[in-house]
Amino acid sequence: MPESRHWLALVLVAGLLWLVHLLTPVITPFMAAAALAYLGDPLVDRLEKVHIFRWRLSRSLAVVLVFGVIFLALAAAALLLLPVLLEQLRHLMNRVPQWSAWLVDTALPWLQARLGLASLDIGGESLKEGLSAYWKEASSALFGVLGTISAGGQAMLRWLMNLILIPVVTFYLLRDWDKLVEGVRTLLPVAGEPTVSRLAGEIDGVLGAFLRGQLMVMLALGLVYTFGLWFVGLDLAFIIGMGAGLLSVVPYLGTLFGVIAALIAAAFQFRDVFHPVMILAVFLLGQSLEGMVLTPKLVGDRVGLHPVVVIFAVLAGGQLFGFLGILLALPIAAALNVVVRHAHRQYRGSMLFRDAAVEDGEN
């Protein structure tokens, strides 16, 4: 009988995962809202404890205040950063035809001479014209996409709907977060409730430390890379620096992307050796700060996820569930890590482990 129940539980879990896979486009905004509510709940709890004379803030008012602060921060960031981003995008689009000309007129002949391929006709002029024409069409399509009614327009409409849905769902989840958590706790079996509650508390501590800390690490690295590349004089410092910072959630991916993109941009812009060396120094400084200061101070060692585990979790989550899988990969991996540590402690304290240890001692 217990074995049949185990098989039934396994089938139910497999069916649930398959259902999640089918409903990924629908579930994604709700999971994003749940993640935002989870991150904002501690701040709302603190605001609830604030007293103004004899009056205490209600939960709904605290949520409204948190939303107001987030909206003002996003608006300020948009006003400050959006013009810089648009300017660098325009600069990138204006430089691509020049870069394609340099590639055809300078880089390819140099490679032909070095590799002994001087007799090989690669159609330089036709390649250059093709690249310029393609880029012109791509840039026109990029700026005209908002006026296009097509499948892309449907995707844009869906994206806008999600953009509206996420803050609405986040508001209601934040307002009722404590009630939802208490409701789940009351559904737990009485015998297992203390253990599950203890594990949930440990998982909550690990996830809070990881998610909030990792977001601050990503932002700090993005600023370090951006200002470092700006100091070097790279025109695309903001795009490359912030992109490398955001991608640093996956170990070494942000650095790899930033180094390759910055070196390519520097090769086109400066065409010397000094600036690439300075760019490598910027990313070396960023990696040193991340390893010795940012991660130990902001994330700490409570999570204990090996870089290989992080990379595998992100790739596996993306392969199975798309963007939803990427969003949930690291939180699920961190929670499973807590469960595995608990199982390891249980095993070390079990008769099975002690009997095995006694047998090893006797042998």
Image: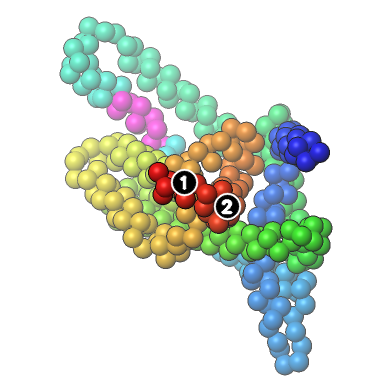
Q: How many tags in the picture?
A: 2
Residue 48 higher or lower than 261, as above or below: below
State yes or no: residue 65 in magenta. no
Front in this rendered view, residue 131 or 258: 258
Front one among 349 and 260: 349
Q: Which residue is mark 2?
A: 351
Q: Quadrant of the C terminus?
A: top left
Which x, y percent locates residue 128? 37, 20
The answer to which quarter of the image holds residue 231 is bottom left
Q: Position of residue 193 (x, y in %)?
A: 74, 61
| Farthest-out residue, bottom | 53
Question: Which residue is found at the position 81% from the left and 38% from the top?
Answer: 1
At which x and y percent is residue 14? Answer: 72, 35
Dot placed on the residue nearer the N-terminal end, 1 or 2:
2
Is residue 230 visible to the viewer in this orientation of the structure? no
Give the main secondary structure of the magenta stretch.
helix
In this orientation, which residue lies closer to the viewer: 191 or 324?
191
Q: Which contiguous range is marked in magenta?
A: 94-103
Which dot marks residue 359?
A: 1
Q: Residue at x 35, y 31 (%)?
A: 98
Amino acid at circle 2: Met
Q: Residues within 10 Å of mark 1 (few under 14, many from 20)?
A: few
